[in-house]
């Protein structure tokens, strides 16, 4: 199949209506596109993977069904196996291994995008443009802040990419700043 961002967005919004989940999809898409450029990979493939990775979560928000339902939908829509495998591997409990750089990157950016949003929202301005890498890494050490975000997953993801956490934060933060308006984080 030929990948098409508009078709991927239509598929996403067929299953996802909640604004927060759509913004998360956009943030992960932006981070994946940034990494595709950094690694010299297919930006469309990587972006669409990020956009669709949680497409089933609103309707299947439990470990028994997510991301299995999404993977099945993607398979039926004839998305490439590399996307389906990455979607499965972004959730460690599935047992799917992160063998490709695509899968490793999706896992690495998923939790981090949410953490960066949390850091932004506690800033007086609530603007991502005021967030610095140091602000994120400082909050990262405070285990009571955004306590549900797995720091271990973020650390493991950065290591899988061969990066320091601060360097990884920088890539994702800049990607999210580029779409601040769409994320309502201006």
Image (spheres, rainbow, N blue to C red):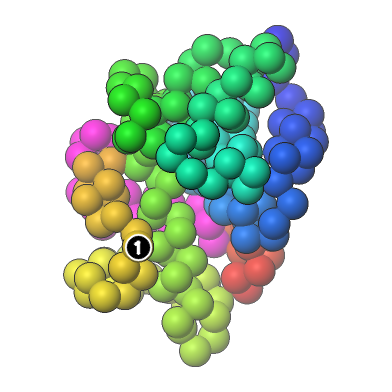
Q: Residue at x 54, y 61 (%)?
A: 177
Query: Would residue 166 be seen by someone viewing this image from the given angle?
Result: yes
Where residue 158 sits, quadrant-wise, is top left
Of the pair 147 and 160, the residue shown nearer to us: 147
Q: Residue at x 58, y 29 (%)?
A: 69
Query: Would residue 167 be seen by someone viewing this image from the given angle?
Result: no
Q: Position of residue 117 (x, y in %)?
A: 48, 66
**Residue 160 shown in magenta:** yes
Seen in the image, is 121 located left or right of residue 155? right
Where residue 98 sits, quadrant-wise, is top left
Region in magenta: 158-177
- In this rendering, the answer to whether 87 lies above or below 138 is above
* Most common secondary structure along the magenta stretch: helix
In which quadrant will I find the C terminus? Answer: bottom right
Per the image, the residue denoted by label 1 is 148
Q: Position of residue 25 (x, y in %)?
A: 60, 47
Of the pair 12 and 162, the residue shown nearer to us: 12
In which quadrant will I find the N terminus? Answer: top right
Q: Residues within 10 Å of mark 1 (few under 14, many from 20)?
A: few
Seen in the image, is 126 located left or right of residue 59? left
Q: Position of residue 104 (x, y in %)?
A: 34, 31
Q: Residue at x 63, y 48 (%)?
A: 58
Q: Position of residue 34 (x, y in %)?
A: 49, 41
Seen in the image, is 72 located left or right of residue 182? left
Q: Residue at x 36, y 70 (%)?
A: 146
Q: Residue furthest bottom?
A: 124
- In this rendering, the answer to whether 119 lies above or below 102 is below
Where residue 40 sits, quadrant-wise, is top left
**Residue 131 shown in magenta:** no
- In this rendering, the answer to whether 15 lies above or below 141 is above
Label tally = 1
Of the pair 148 and 181, the residue shown nearer to us: 148
């Amino acid at each position: 199949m030929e990948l098409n961002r508009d078709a991927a967005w239509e598929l996403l919004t067929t299953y996802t209506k909640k604004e927060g989940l759509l913004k998360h999809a956009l943030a992960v898409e932006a981070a994946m596109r940034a990494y595709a450029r950094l690694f010299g990979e297919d930006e469309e493939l990587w972006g669409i993977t990020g956009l669709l990775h949680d497409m089933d979560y609103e309707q299947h928000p439990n470990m028994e069904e997510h991301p299995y339902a999404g993977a099945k939908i993607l398979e039926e829509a004839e998305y490439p196996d590399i996307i389906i495998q990455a979607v499965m591997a972004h959730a460690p409990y599935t047992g799917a291994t992160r063998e490709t750089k695509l899968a490793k990157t999706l896992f690495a950016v998923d939790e981090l995008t949410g953490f960066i949003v949390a850091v932004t929202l506690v800033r007086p301005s609530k603007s991502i443009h005021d967030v610095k890498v140091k602000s994120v890494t400082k909050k990262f050490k405070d285990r009571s802040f955004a306590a549900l975000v797995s720091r271990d997953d973020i650390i493991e993801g950065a290591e899988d990419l061969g990066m320091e956490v601060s360097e990884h934060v920088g890539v994702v933060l800049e990607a999210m700043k580029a779409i601040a308006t769409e994320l309502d984080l201006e």
